[in-house]
Amino acid sequence: MIEDSATLARYRRLAPFAVLAAALGALSAYVAIFRGQAIGITGVLAYALAATLVLHHVLGRMRKMESLSMTDSLTGLPNRRALHSDLVDLRDPDAEMALALIDLDGFKSINDHHGHLLGDALLKNCADILREVCGDEGRSYRLGGDEFAVLATGQLAGTILEGICRRYMERLARAQRIEGRSLAIGLSAGLARFEAGTELSSTEMLRQADVAMYASKASGRMRCTWFHLDFDIRREATRKLEADLATALREGELQVEYQPLVDAKDNKIVAVEALVRWPQPDGTQISPSVFIPIAEECGLIEHLGDWVLEQACTQALDWTDITLSVNVSPAQLRDPGFAVRLGHILERTGFPPERLELEVTETYLVGDPTVAGRSLDLIRRFGVGVALDDFGTGYASIGFLRKFSFEKLKLDRSLMVEAANDEGSRTMMVSTIAVARALNMDVTAEGVETADQADLARAAGCDQIQGWLYYKAIPANEIKQLLAGSGVNERDESEVGNGHVERA
């Protein structure tokens, strides 16, 4: 496209000379005739024809190059430049215009792990589907990478555009057969509209659609979201939080605390889970559920995750005979360099890999099981264990457990609560634990806050129990004191209160 633009620029520079050549030819012929010079009608025609051919060639090439500069070379769809042009040319103050920016969910992973040729083939197929879904109701564009756009104008443009996006989402939800592979992909769409009688520049319309698209991603993907003014307020707050988080990392304001896990039989501490904390000057805390997603979005998760891992391995080095669990985000696991950095951290700290356990969530594993399996295999080569966290909150099944062979299964608190109140849920929990034990997985009950829940966990066959009934997350120096003490006792339930609210 750069070469096409350069060529187009050259032809644009030549066009005035071609026009001048044709004009001079006609003028020369006229002067010759006026002076009575006998150049002959054939000469005049030949000279004029030559100049006209040059002009026709230059203008033809200009039209062709102009068309190429407005077209995406891979998919044949109009490109970003064409969209900008249409937003201006098709704008009617008395009519509605609506724009959708569409980002394919999961494309980068497919492109990275199956190659760019297959990725390009997938993009072409997605473009063909978008053309078909739009029909005569909307104009489709490819803006670059895995980002597409749809523009609708006229009466009910917004309603028509949302319908196009939802049909496109449904079509992409079906697996596509690309070069012998069955590939599933989703989308996140952000929509903005220019209503009749309102003032909205094309640049602002694009910005609003982009903000709405990121809101779709933040809300869980696979959805269409219309822009709302509240998004700008939240976006500004998020930007401030990003800057503050970067400062906190740089200035050492973050802390790591540890929540003990106890043996279900004798209540002795057998493991600790590292939990990152961000204390504020006023004594409050910003929840990890708030700043971890922001770190993933703005690219700080690599730095944050590595810092937590190294800090935990350093502090837990002398806590012999107990396991250290560290949460790893999906963004970290998708990073090809994570396993290498893990090895370097183990080497620098001297932490025994057999005492380290990384906790992963099923969301990442379900998204791309093949890639996830490879990542977990690399981690296990260091001798590090892998635990499946928050089991019971999503898609994981018995077959899922067999496929990945986790060293530990952690039952989410919600599953424990449901099992305490419902016979069917209790039966399912007991069956799950039985399967996990048959697959040589330890089982931990998370979020235990009452003695009844602890008794249920023991009766169901859990190996370990974690929760406020025993311990909240505490600083490293308090863990050392506990391990030096004589044992562990259950806390009185009246002391637990609303402790689960602070859990990471």
Image (cartoon, grey):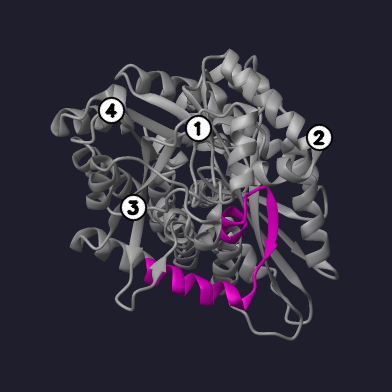
Q: Is residue 259 above or below residue 369?
A: below
Disc on the earlier residue, 3 or 1:
1
* Picture coordinates of residue 467, whole percent (x, y): 50, 47
Please report whichever mark, 4 or 1, sits nearer to the chain's N-terminal start.
Answer: 1
Q: CA distance from mark 4 to mark 2?
A: 37 Å
Residue with the mark numbered 2: 424
Considering the numbered disc 3 on the image, is that residue within a helix, a strand or a loop?
loop
Q: Which residue is mark 3?
A: 300
Q: Position of residue 66 (x, y in %)?
A: 53, 52
Residues shaded magenta: 214-241
As drawn, which residue projects farthest toward the front?
486
Please name the residue that numbered disc 4 is placed on. Answer: 321
Do residues under tags 3 and 4 come within 8 Å of each other at their CB atoms?
no
Labelled disc at residue 264: 1
Residue 175 to residue 232: above or below: above
- Residue at 50% across, 22% down: 406
Which numbered mark, 3 or 2, is in the foreground of this view?
Answer: 2
Tag 3–tag 2 contact (CB < 8 Å): no
Q: Position of residue 26 (x, y in %)?
A: 50, 61
- 46 or 323, which is in the foreground? 323
